[in-house]
Image (cartoon, coloured by chain):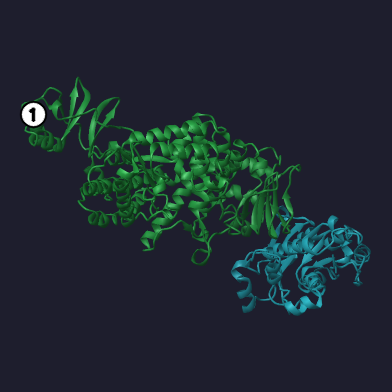
Chain colours: A green, B cyan
Amino acid sequence: MEVELSEILDVISQHAPFNEMEDNALLQGMVHDIEIQYVRNGTGVIVPNVTNEHLYFIRSGAVEVLSKEDKLLRRMEEGELFGYASLLRGGKVTQEIRAIEDSLLYLIPGSWFKRLYDENDTFSDFFEIIREIRLRAAIDSQTSQTSDVSLMTCPVTSLLRRPPISIELNDSIRMAALKMAEFKVSSLLITQADELVGIVTDRDLRTRCIAAGLSYEESIENIMTAHPITLDSGDFASEAVIKMMGQNVHHLPVTKNGKAIGVISAGDIVQKESHGSVYLISDIFKQQNLASLISISKKIQHTFTQLVHADANTVMIGNAISRIGTAFVERILQLAEQELGAPPIPYCFIALGSQAREEQTISTDQDNALILSDAYNAEIHGTYFKRLADYVCHGLDKCGYPLCTGDIMASNNQWRQPLKQWQEYFSQWIQEPKAESLLRMSIFFDIRSIYGDEKLARELNKHIRYLAKSHRGFLSHMARNANQRNPPLGFFRQFVLDGSGKQARTFNLKERGIAPIIDIVRVHALACGSQKLNTMERLDDIENAGLLPNGRAKDLAAALEMIGMVRIRHQTNQIEAGIEPNNHVDPESLSSFERRHLRDAFHIVSRQQEFIKYRYAGERS
Amino acid sequence: MIFNKKPAPSLLDWKQSFQTLEKNAPQGPLKRFYEQGAVAYDTPLRDTSMVSLDLETTGLNPEKDAIVSAGLVPLNHQRIQCRGSKYWMFTPDSPLSHKSVTIHEMTHEDLNGAPSLEDCFEEVLAALAKKVVIVHCVHIEREFLLKASLKLYGQPLYFPILDTMEIENRILKQRSWIEKLKQGRISIRLDACRQRYNLPRYKAHHALTDAYSSAELLQAQMAHHLDEDQPISNYWL
């Protein structure tokens, strides 16, 4: 007669993957073959060169995994499993696993591990050992848990309410208006031999026809928007939002195999999603003075939380918030030019850092600069641009983008210079790099034109890409700088925590997780001459350039998404609790899911930091 | 490492004692138990095969109270083997007191249809044969089983025991006077001992769980304080 080992079975079945396995009889069988071992703090449980024959379950205590160089890779505690990596390699052990507390361990025979791995999908899914794969799967399952009304998971086709209403290219404006009235639509597609060639909206009828005094008998071609931006039938509603926000349009035709199958309007999306982030941008442009801009800036937080609740991912949120930020800059500059008069020479207002990468979140201070045309003459133009810069920077400050503590702003004389001076700056930074000076400079390598003469920013970016790629010494400095901030690897047990006072039990997710990834990716991006600014897009370029071993670029992207998402959720909770959002996360406030995957993400960051140290090892000076 | 000074318990050589006991035992399970012999006194701890045993009883008095359940699990100096776990419930011949019902959460209903101790005694003996028995507090298990054996076979049942409570007591006595002063009186109850070794807390008073409890406690005591090369006779009772 088999004895019921309910005590052990109960504990085991509370933890993954056993808690999700439905085959109770199988587990009961397994439990009978368990052996129990007590190990003292400091004892090596699994050691290199000794074959491992067990899967270990930590009943009490904790262990740590050490690399060949005796470096801490990660810690594991009660309820977690270890030893599977070596079991999957036929028992070959490469990393030492050592008790760091007096621990009681359940030893599950390797034969059971193999059997469950082969027979039970839940079990084997859990051990898709390569951590990175586990991490990616976690992110996927997170997004698929979301409700189907969210933007992320809502296909644009589900928003289509009717087949497209269209007329031929050579039909008249009057016919178009009649058709729109008949079908009660605010937009009309223009086709030629069944191909989509343009779109006309109510607004076009008003501004391009009636206001312009155009004859109603003219061809519709005269007032349509030719080659409109379209959506693909496979796109999600989130894509529609991004396109509408980015291009400031309210109607997007949806095509399938090149043929229009319908139109999505901003209204369709707003009906689905009431956050109205699409409209915040157009609202920004409607404001006639700084005071009213300041008052609508209060809506940013709301838009942010709505996006989070709509299950947007970090790329979408970063994109939306950055574009809102950009809209504020644009509008404030327009107001400034109204007040100060037209600029005497061309200039380009550039965003640096997160806004340039389109990764802005809530509560970021401003980082910006001015590139002036080389026609700049300080005596003649100096005052104008000084006033312009002060106007923008202080205006932004009042709109919730605090002044940069490092004074990296257009209002600082040093960062308001003609193109040739900027090129000179970068030549110096790249050709004669000094670690200390580069440390606070990294955001200068993310430059995006926000307003004005885009050519100036493009010229400067070209200059940087050309120089950076060919200067190994510079890349090695940047790589070293990217290693300045380390992820809090041991955070879940021995809290490696930052700060003091109120933030004593927290760590800074931005400093310790997100910034290191951005820094790593920037080094690779500079090395391969990528033109991209967004970290995820840079990773694509890096992968295509073959700078990283297979799959590593995706790992970094997954880690960034994971850490970014935890940060965004943390900030959302703060906003909703009426607290000023920040980046300080208390590890105790995280779910075990978040902790496990954050740890995996940090692990990736740490390894990739190691990697760039060697990849861009410079000459010793 | 402690216990290097040999204590002088009365039955130091269990192998020899078993030979004597075997002679007086009547034909049957008890005799067969003794015939299989005991662990030699000079066997190092690391080579000793052990079984952790716990009895739940209706009270503390072996004269009046009965055994209601027994649980055991085999182990060696390094590992506890779940595979050999055993658990019995017995129909007691003395009525369950209210007190024991509340402690063990066991009622007559649970025990209805359970065999009597007599029916299972042979199995229990077979599981203990050739092993050193681990208990927490030697008196209960030794005296209740002695009483049962006398009743069943007219002859006593003795076997070597390693008492985790006695071991803990000896460990605590080894503390320096300053440690004793600082730590004060320390409980040697099973749960209290386990907590000192960072062992998980269990719900007590289930015979099998308690057998695991003492087995794990012994593992911890061995890892921290006992010398596995020392002969078992240094530790057994």
Quadrant in which the N terminus of chain A appears: bottom right
- Residue A29: percent from the left, percent from the top? 64, 49
At numbered mark 1, what does the secondary structure look like: helix, strand or loop? Answer: helix
Quadrant in which the C terminus of chain A appears: top right
- Residue A337: percent from the left, percent from the top? 24, 46
Residue A305 sits in quarter: bottom left
Q: Is residue B164 above or below residue A391?
A: below
Amino acid found under the numbered disc labelled 1: Met
Q: Nearer the viewer, residue A444 or A526?
A: A444
- Residue A404: percent from the left, percent from the top? 41, 53
Q: Nearer the viewer, residue A175 or B135?
A: A175
Chain where mark 1 sits: A
Q: Residues within 10 Å of mark 1 (few under 14, many from 20)?
A: some
Q: How many marks?
A: 1
Name the residue located 21 percent from the left edge and 22 percent from the top edge.
A194
Relative to A413, is A34 on the left or the right? right
Residue B132 sits in quarter: bottom right
Q: Is residue B16 visible?
A: yes
Q: Is residue A121 visible?
A: no
Name the residue located 54 percent from the left edge and 34 percent from the top edge.
A551
Relative to A487, is B226 on the left or the right? right
Q: Nearer the viewer, residue B132 or A487?
A: A487
Name the residue located 77 percent from the left edge and 60 percent from the top edge.
B223
- Residue A288: percent from the left, percent from the top? 20, 51
The residue beneath circle 1 is: A175
In the image, farthest residue toward the top: A193
Residue A374 sits in quarter: top left
